[in-house]
Structures are given as structure tokens and as C-alpha cells.
Image: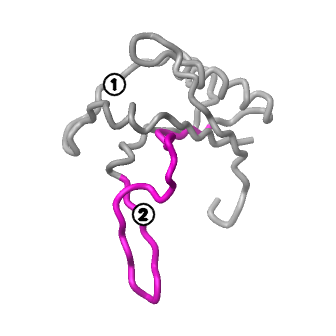
Amino acid sequence: MKYLMLVCWDAEKMDAQSEPEPNENAKEESFPWLDDLRARGIWVTGDQLASPRRARSVRVRDGKTLVTDGPFAETKEFLVGYWIVEVSGEARALDIAARVSSCPGPGGTPLNMPVEVRQVMPGPCA
């Protein structure tokens, strides 16, 4: 079964971090937990997302496309990344999410960030 892991983090801390220019490649970092998932064939895909300050919300009203700056939700924590893993069941996905939540951040201190885990359901897009 495939599970989507949505990782959230403090928006102010995320906005304070530097990010590469659009034409610049991001620095490749090594994460032992990710290396382990890849080695065991569990990792499907995933990525970090740009800062909330670069987000745009799009909707159509009365046939007109409206684009607004920033995320729609007003919250202190924003989606910073996502991962899809393929595992035997929910319990294994929750174990992986716990490892991700407690991974070290800047300075080596565990981030303890929330990770939402949702099963990927087969559908017409599959």
C-alpha cells in the first residue's frame, strides 16, 4: 500500500531559511533515514516545497481565474514537503512518520514536526 506523508513546519522558521534561486540547484543533503528507505525499496517519491511566501492560490469564479499570493490557510504551520512510501500497511507508515518527525534539524535538535499520514487510494488518475 502507498502512503502519503505530509510534513508541516513552523512558517516563520521556514521563511527565515535561505532558499536557492530558481535557476540554482539546491544543495544535496544526506538524511540517514531516507537513505535507509531507498536501500529497502520503500521510498517512492517526495520533495521539499518552496516557502509559503512563494505560494499562490488559484480558483475560478464566474469564469475568471483569480490568483492570490500565499497559502489560503491561516495557520502557523505550513506544508513543507511530502513523501510517498510503499509499505505493507498503516502501522509501518506510522513508524516511518515517527522517524521523520523526530529527525534532527538545524543544530542537530529534533524538529518534532507533525507528519500527516494518508493512504493513497486507487482512482481514475492511477
Residue extending farthest to the top is: 108
Magenta part of the chain: 55-84
Residue drawn where x is 59% and y is 19% of the image? 102
**Relative to 122, residue 114 above or below:** above
Q: Position of residue 125 (x, y in %)?
A: 62, 63
**Relative to 98, residue 120 above or below:** below
**Relative to 115, residue 32 above or below:** above
Q: Is residue 89 magenta?
A: no
Amino acid on which disc 2 is placed: Ser
Q: Nearer the viewer, residue 88 or 99?
A: 99
Residue drawn where x is 39% and y is 31% of the image? 13
First in sequence, mark 2 or 1: give its number.
Answer: 1
Residue drawn where x is 53% and y is 15% of the image? 110
Q: Position of residue 111 (x, y in %)?
A: 52, 21
Q: Quadrant of residue 21?
A: top left
Disc 2: CA contacts within 10 A as few (<14), some (14-19) or many (>=20)? few
Q: Quadrant of residue 36?
A: top right
Residue where numbered disc 1 is placed: 28
Distance from disc 2 to disc 1, alpha carbons, whole Å, reads 29 Å
Question: Judging from the image, what secondary structure is the residue with disc 1 in?
Answer: loop
Q: Nearer the viewer, residue 47 or 125?
A: 47
Question: Judging from the image, what secondary structure is the residue with disc 2 in?
Answer: strand
Q: Nearer the viewer, residue 81 or 77?
A: 77
**Disc 2 versus disc 1: nearer the observer:** 2
How would you classify the magenta stretch by its main secondary structure? strand
Residue where numbered disc 2 is placed: 57
